[in-house]
Image (spheres, rainbow, N blue to C red):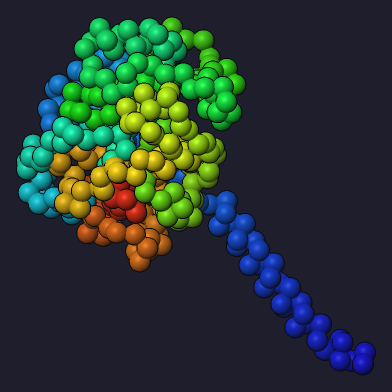
Amino acid sequence: MHRAIQSSTPKLLAIRCLLLLSLVAGVRAAASPLVSTVDSVDITVSNMERAVDFYSHVLSFQNVSDTEVAGENYEDLEGVYGVRMRVVRMQLGDEFIELTEYLAPKGRPIPAEARSNDRSFQHIAIIVSDMDKAYAWLRQNNVEQISSAPQRLPNWNRNASGIKAFYFKDPDGHPLEILQFPPDKGADKWHRPSDKLFLGIDHTAIVVGDTEATLHLYRDLLGMRVVGESENYGTEQEHLNNVFGAHLRITSLRAGSGPGIELLEYLSPRDGRRFPEDEHANDVIHRQTVVVTKSADHAARDLSSKVNFVSFGVITNQMDKLGCKSAFIVRDPDGHAVEIEQK
């Protein structure tokens, strides 16, 4: 009996080692998500001079770069033939947006009847130091309102109480939000004393049809973590979104750095239009969330059979002109575009 136990010991040790290695690999995988950063939101615009003027003079963004590109690499990246595009990168606080004008071929404008509960909805949430002053400034600059007025979310809603918010549009009709957090909510940096009115971007929000299906991409595949959840309804939410009967399930995700991604699922009404199946990057309704990965090739292999690709593989040539080594674009379950870059 003693010899039998002794002879089986190496096998037991080997099994234990394999189990330990599996556990270590699992910990490493959990510690190394596919995506490390939300870099920016790319917004297609119809007139770059007008868009830059609006974002710089009305919202205080600063120009970082201004680049014009064309050729087969960018056709393969964006899925648009014959493309020539101008990309202006802009910064507010620590965060960035990229404005892209397709000089050729021109796409379609945003439909006039677009609503906040349509699946194509996406906005950036800009933090302000004073909601009343920010609203007055936007009114002075004749922005098109979505909300009837700034709304303070009610005290009964524990996860959102005290937040002040207002929806409006840029000159192309892209929805935007200004947001002010109460002292007990939001990142510490949003509460530091500042003489600036517009401080930075807290998150980008997208409308989704099924939160769990969308989490499979952003949480399970890309490795972002859920940092907050809320269920919002009532007259304040209705007047914020300008959707009668608005009842939303809201799920907030974050990567290691950069703005968050907020999932907005309308529990009611469920009559929002589906994402246009024929939408392309040169259509003005187009926005894409840009995230950063350690290896674009590795990310593409991991996602190859799990999501729909816009790009024809990983694009590497001449990508340094847009500030990265390689990139590709995929769509989430509702059609929102995600550009995955290797810096």
Residue 153 seen in the current view: yes
Q: In the rendering, at what x and y percent does residue 225 appear?
A: 53, 45
| Position of the C terminus by quadrant | top left
Left/right of residue 137 with respect to residue 317 in the rendered view = right
Q: In the rendering, at what x and y percent does residue 215 appear?
A: 46, 51
| Position of the N terminus by quadrant | bottom right
Position of residue 308 relative to residue 6, above or below, is above
Q: Quadrant of residue 18?
A: bottom right
Q: In the rendering, at what x and y percent does residue 268 appear?
A: 39, 41
Q: Quadrant of residue 167?
A: top left
Depth check, front residue: 154 or 64: 154
Q: In the rendering, at what x and y percent does residue 106 appear?
A: 7, 39
**In the image, what residue occupies the spot 34% across and 31% down?**
244
How many numbered badges does the structure rendering display? 0
Left/right of residue 50 with respect to residue 242 in the rendered view = left
Position of residue 50 relative to residue 309, above or below, is above
Depth check, front residue: 149 or 186: 149
**In the image, what residue occupies the spot 7% across and 49% down?**
82
